[in-house]
Amino acid sequence: MRDRVLARCDAFNAAHPWDHDAAYHGWIERRLPPRFGSALDVGCGTGEFTRRLARRADRVTGIDVDPGIVRTAAEPSTGPGIEFRCGDLLSADLPGRYDVVTALAVLHHVPLEAGLTRLRDLVAPGGTLVVLGVPREAGFLDSALGVVAVPANLLVGAVRTRRRSSAVRPVAMTAPTAPSTATFRQVREVARRVVPGARTRRHLFWRYSLVWTADDAGS
């Protein structure tokens, strides 16, 4: 029975696709300063959130490992101060540090501690790091959120598809994807070591957040 329900949900989602990360763009923005000099958006995808950051920043860089999606992101007029480049979080040659660093649905693609350490090291003193991650479900709270998320996901998918032109669909990613291996509890344990004082919480739609401010002496 459970497998049949999940199969029907998967079929519905395929017909009504939408970006779960985009549901939290506004929430992330409310955790950022009203103005900042530089920003880095890791896993930028089509660049939607990168452009939202550009409304507040003097300079924004979006990076993604998918060369096709980076070309798509760069196709519209980017305007001054916005740059898109193809690169991996762990190996990308990025100059200096940034006042704001965001990483949406990225950390489960790389070793957790190495990825979070790299993100931390990219944040300038006094800067802000916001991670929106994908946890591996484990325990009662994750299961309960999952139960609530399924009908909510179907409802949002139906509403967003109705509002969107039938000719406009989310752009497919061509880079390899990976299932999440770290639970929310494991993320919190790593965060205590790597980014002490970070605020973490579970969210609907199979996501968690981590918000951390680097002290003025540097991390």
Image (tube, rainbow, N blue to C red):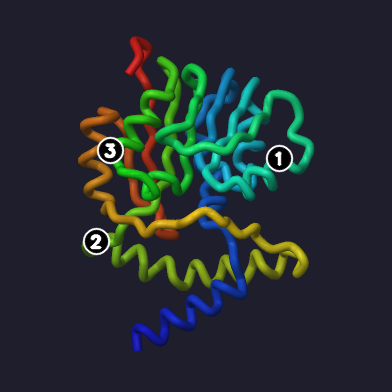
Q: Which residue is mark 3?
A: 113
| Alpha carbons under labels 2 and 3: distance apart | 19 Å
Q: Residue at x 34, y 35 (%)?
A: 116
The residue carrying pointer 3 sits among few (fewer than 14), some (14 to 19) or many (20 or more) residues within 10 Å by Cα, namely: some
Q: Could you say where residue 94 lies in the image, as x and y percent from the top left?
A: 50, 24
Image side of residue 197 versus residue 179, left or right: left
Q: Is residue 25 above or below residue 122?
A: below
Which element carries disc 3, helix, strand or loop? Answer: helix
Quarter of the C terminus within the rendering: top left
Residue 75: image x %, image y %?
75, 43
Q: Earlier in the sequence, mark 2 or mark 3?
A: 3
Q: Nearer the viewer, residue 3 or 93?
A: 93
Q: How many marks?
A: 3
From the viewer's perspective, tell me whether residue 214 is left or right of residue 192.
Answer: right
* Neighbours of disc 1 within 10 Å: few (<14), some (14-19), many (20+): some
Q: Residue at x 61, y 71 (%)?
A: 16
Q: Which quadrant, please, contains the N terminus? A: bottom left
Q: Secondary structure at mark 2?
A: loop
Mark linked to residue 140: none
Question: Are circles 2 and 3 on residues that touch, CB within 8 Å?
Answer: no
Going by the picture, which residue comes out furthest to the top?
217
For marks 1 and 2, the one nearer the N-term is 1
Amino acid at pointer 3? Glu
Picture coordinates of residue 190 (x, y %)? Answer: 23, 38
Say which label, 3 or 1, has the lower sequence index: 1
| Residue at the disc numbered 1 | 74
Q: Which residue type carries mark 2?
A: Ala
- Graded by Cα atoms within 10 Å as few (under 14), some (14 to 19) or many (20 or more), the crowding at tag 2 reads few
**Residue visible at 51% across and 19% down?**
95
Whole-Å distance between the Cαs marked 1 and 2? 38 Å
- Which residue is denoted by mark 2 in the rendering? 138
